[in-house]
Image (spheres, rainbow, N blue to C red):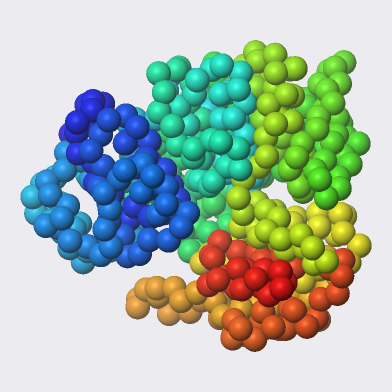
Amino acid sequence: KEKINMSSNKHIHFIGICGVAMSALAIAFKKQGWQVTGSDVGFYPPVSTHLKEAGINFYPGWHPEKMGVPDLVVVGNVASSSNPEWLTVKEKNITYQSYPEVIKEFFVKKNSIVVAGTYGKSTSSCLLSWILQETGLNPTYMFGGIALNNLPPAEMSAGEWSVLEGDEYKASRWDTGAKFFYYSPTHLLLTSVVWDHADVYPTEAEYIGAFQELVESVPLQGLCVLSEKAIPVLKTTRNYISYGKTAGNDYFYTDVKENASGLNFLIKYKDQTFSIESKCLGDYMADNITGCFALCHKIGLPPEKIITAIQNFRGMKRRLEKRYEGEITVFDDIAHSPTKAEAVLRSLRHIYAGKIYAVFEPNTGHRQREARAGYAHAFSAADEVYIPRLTKIKINSEDSARPMEGDELAKIIGETNPHVSYEPDDDHLVQKLLEKTSPGDVIVFLGSHSFRGMIESLISKLSL
């Protein structure tokens, strides 16, 4: 494809602009002086609000006549083979790129920090972007989420550093390889490797192989910072820095204390000990923070400045985000796999003495039958688990394997947690939560979808 010159006054159009990542890219280009337009099936706050505030022209539906003839079209995965705008792009031979191709061309810098892993990558890439910004490195960055600090999810700068969230999911409708293969890491932070996305990686070996290839792609003079959770499954012979909670790691954390306001712990490196305070909830955040600290320390940032930036970091939306606090506390978390759900529930059990009620919806990959084994004991820390009506997903007519629906998923979880039920009616589920809970209890919504307004409905009723 033709290489696009990075200059203002060019027209870039996004097919599928309303996603968190795509809208963030759109706003970043707008700040650089580009004419930005976009289309999608629907628009909802906060994304629609951010696009309007940025002065971006967007519209619902697919209308080639509104799209015009852009210099570049960014094609989201929402664009099916019959999408009228996508068909027009090919018919008129308009230059197009996928989301990771845009990142490769406009965001990757001389020093390219890539954060990858089954979990922890969004928060870690957000925290690293924050630390580098607060320590004056002026990074170009991109992470998939919304920071609770005043930090846009994407920014282009003139600095020599970039921080990019390296997603292992397929790059585009024409490239089933991982997004992170486009990002040319000179510095890699790998948080974890636990088989996920069975819809893209049918076997565990294929999934691990993608991360193996990513590690090997880092130049020998580069830096690999690997979690103790990832090292055992990789077969790398290259040098790396390790981190985790085990004392044998190069950087390890200890004395973790957490409460409803955050956590504090110690990081040890050789004969040095660093005291860390964080406003973030979740004992697993000690792991994410230690990985980020290790990378920043290794590239030469002053420890005291790293620690101050960590202390001022407020986390991200939908990462153990406290949505309501009264007699009942309500959390929202993007935990859409049993592994992520287990970590969130375990952490809440450490903090709260009351009962924990979990509402869980898995992502597409964890509705595949191959993912069944991962559910064993994942919800042990919850007193009760509810599976709502699951979001309808497209099914390949050539694939005879049907994804699990809510009733089947409830039975699978019920094999190791008897207090689980399938509740297909949203209003009934909200009412059940209101009736069941007592002062001191916690309700946590776990999943990548928006739960169709159930959280807002619940909070509204709790606030009466």
Residue 245 at x, y percent in the picture? 82, 37
Q: Is residue 168 visible?
A: yes
Residue occupying image coordinates x 56% and y 61%: 448
Above or below — where is 402 with respect to 40? below
Residue occupying image coordinates x 78% and y 83%: 435
The mark total stands at 0
Residue 166 at x, y percent in the picture? 50, 40
| Nearer to the camera, 114 or 312 | 312
Residue occupying image coordinates x 89% and y 41%: 257
| Nearer to the camera, 49 or 239 | 49
Q: Quadrant of residue 285?
A: top right
Q: Residue furthest left?
A: 92
Left or right of 164 in this view: 190: right
In the rendered image, the quadrant that contains the C terminus is bottom right
| Nearer to the camera, 14 or 407 | 14
| Nearer to the camera, 43 or 338 | 43
Residue occupying image coordinates x 86% and y 74%: 438
Above or below — where is 276 with respect to 317? above
Left or right of 258 in this view: 181: left
Q: Quadrant of residue 396?
A: bottom left
Above or below — where is 314 with respect to 176? above
In the rendered image, the quadrant that contains the N terminus is top left
Residue 416 at x, y percent in the picture? 80, 75
Q: Is residue 235 visible?
A: no
Residue 398 at x, y percent in the picture? 35, 76
Left or right of 375 in this view: 151: left
